[in-house]
């Protein structure tokens, strides 16, 4: 009998939800064949079969939440025809409930019996004491347990903050509604975006950029670029390089707050927001300042394909220092992007449209794009934010600055 367990899911990820099983009990499986899909708060992960044989038992059913290392099921020896005998030894499943046992005393203790300090912390932070392992007598949760859980990020795994329950729909409307449970990814997107609004002093500054020079450069070299590098020349390579040049000038936009400290990052890991059917994900181009435009374009194209196929790894979405999001591909003219916490800045790109502008006293038609920089005003002053966006604008309007490092 071979156990199927939840693999290590990556830094800070402690649990997942069973998305779906690809096999039913009694069906033959091959080693390394995808068996079950797990939905974490960051990515969807397929768990491969650890050995060949027969899926004799499914312990964790669709929709259940499981922790790292939890038993998902068992694989028995033989082929599909031998499914019945393989599934017979029920005692093998007996250890499965064991992991839940330590949490039972804590969950059974009434919230008030944990003490007023615990109740106060729970009220202030939204962390449910029932979700914290208690070290006190009879499994009671102590103040130290709550503080440790908060420091370890338990607030992310705890129940969401209270949300107003919607009023019941009229019977004629209710029959035409569909209620679908939010995926872990969607829940996390909702929580993180709201946390960013609640935590950061978020402000947005705008500018517009004349895309004539970049579009001309792209039009002139796109065929030769694709022939040499095997990837298309888009706009993201230019924007990434322009952002890095601005971050070097205004380091506060590449910093974050850690307690009472400011952490300035002398490296440039640029997150590129990608929309998928399951929600927004942000893969990170690491050390983008050391990459050429071609290498950046290849990395972004590769991440885009993996994101759409649900193949992004958790490690590919960690460590970002600044984010770029492009609503223009969907037709957005202007928006105020929300920070990707704990980062202090995010650049919003928008659609390019021809508009009349005044150049040297003459009205001319130019391809213009609105840019939006949302920033954390706790770290970044208004002067710095505006200067940063002007630097991005200047670089894009005169790409020779990238070559000359100006």
Image (cartoon, rainbow, N blue to C red):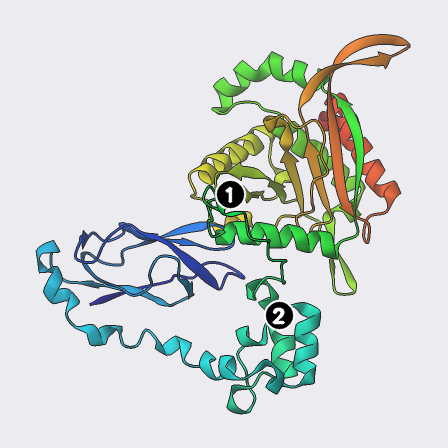
Which residue, as the protein is rendered here, is positioned at the far front?
Answer: 171
Would you call the spot at circle 2 few (<14 residues within 10 Å), some (14-19), or many (20 or more)?
Answer: many
Which residue, as the protein is rendered here, is positioned at the far right?
Answer: 361
Q: Which mark is residue 127?
A: 2
Residue 177 x/y as whole percent: 48, 44
Foreground of the two, 397 or 129: 129
Residue 335 x/y as whole percent: 71, 34
Q: Secondary structure at mark 2?
A: loop
Q: Is residue 86 above or below residue 182?
A: below
Separation of residues labelled 1 and 2 (CA atoms): 35 Å
Viewport quadrant of the N terminus: bottom left
At a point 51% along the width and 43% down the height, the residue shown is: 173
Foreground of the two, 386 or 106: 106
Q: Is residue 309 above or below residue 151?
A: above
Residue 401 x/y as whole percent: 76, 26
- Is residue 405 visible to the viewer in this orientation of the structure? no
Decide which of tag 1 and tag 2 comes sooner along the chain.
Answer: 2
Viewport quadrant of the C terminus: top right
Foreground of the two, 183 or 74: 183
Which residue, as the protein is rendered here, is positioned at the far bottom?
Answer: 137
Question: Is 151 left or right of 61, judged from the image as shown?
Answer: right
Q: Secondary structure at mark 1?
A: helix
At a point 76% along the width and 27% down the height, the residue shown is: 395
At a point 86% along the width and 47% down the height, the residue shown is: 381
Residue 46 x/y as whole percent: 36, 51
Q: Which mark is residue 173?
A: 1
**Tally of marks:** 2
Q: Is residue 399 above or below residue 278?
A: above
Would you call the spot at circle 1 few (<14 residues within 10 Å), some (14-19), or many (20 or more)?
Answer: few
Foreground of the two, 256 or 191: 191
Picture quadrant where residue 76 is located = bottom left
- Is residue 258 visible to the viewer in this orientation of the structure? yes
């Amino acid at each position: 009998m071979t156990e199927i367990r939840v693999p290590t899911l990556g830094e800070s990820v402690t649990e997942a939800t069973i998305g779906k099983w690809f096999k039913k009990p009694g069906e033959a499986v091959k080693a390394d064949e995808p068996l079950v899909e797990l939905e974490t708060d960051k990515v969807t992960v397929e768990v491969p079969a650890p050995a060949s044989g027969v899926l004799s038992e499914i312990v964790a059913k669709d929709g259940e939440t499981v922790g790292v290392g939890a038993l998902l099921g068992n694989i028995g020896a033989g082929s599909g025809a031998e499914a019945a005998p393989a599934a017979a030894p029920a005692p093998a499943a007996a250890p499965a409930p064991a992991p839940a046992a330590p949490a039972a005393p804590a969950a059974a203790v009434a919230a008030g019996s944990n003490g007023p300090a615990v109740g106060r912390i729970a009220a202030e932070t939204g962390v449910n004491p029932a979700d914290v392992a208690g070290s006190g007598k009879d499994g009671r949760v102590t103040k130290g347990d709550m503080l440790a859980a908060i420091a370890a990020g338990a607030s992310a795994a705890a129940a969401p903050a209270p949300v107003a329950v919607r009023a019941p729909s009229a019977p004629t409307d209710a029959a035409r509604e569909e209620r679908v449970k939010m995926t872990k990814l969607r829940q996390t997107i909702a929580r993180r975006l709201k946390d960013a609004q609640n935590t950061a002093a978020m402000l947005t500054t705008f500018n517009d950029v004349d895309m004539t020079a970049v579009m001309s450069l792209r039009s002139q070299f796109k065929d030769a670029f694709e022939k040499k590098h095997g990837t298309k020349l888009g706009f993201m390579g230019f924007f990434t390089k322009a952002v890095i040049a601005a971050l070097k000038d205004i380091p506060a936009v590449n910093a974050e707050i850690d307690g009472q400290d400011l952490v300035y990052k002398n490296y440039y890991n640029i997150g590129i927001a990608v929309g998928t059917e399951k929600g927004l994900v942000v893969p990170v181009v690491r050390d983008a300042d050391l990459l050429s435009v071609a290498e950046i374009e290849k990395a972004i194209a590769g991440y885009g394909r993996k994101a759409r196929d649900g193949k992004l790894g958790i490690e590919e979405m960690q460590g970002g220092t600044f984010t770029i999001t492009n609503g223009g591909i969907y037709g957005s003219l202007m928006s105020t992007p929300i920070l990707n916490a704990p980062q202090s800045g995010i650049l919003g790109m928008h659609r390019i449209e021809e508009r009349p502008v005044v150049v040297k006293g003459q009205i001319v038609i130019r391809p213009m794009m609105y840019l939006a920089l949302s920033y954390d005003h706790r770290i970044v002053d208004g002067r710095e934010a505006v200067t940063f966006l002007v630097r991005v604008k200047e670089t894009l309007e005169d790409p020779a600055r990238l070559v000359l490092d100006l």
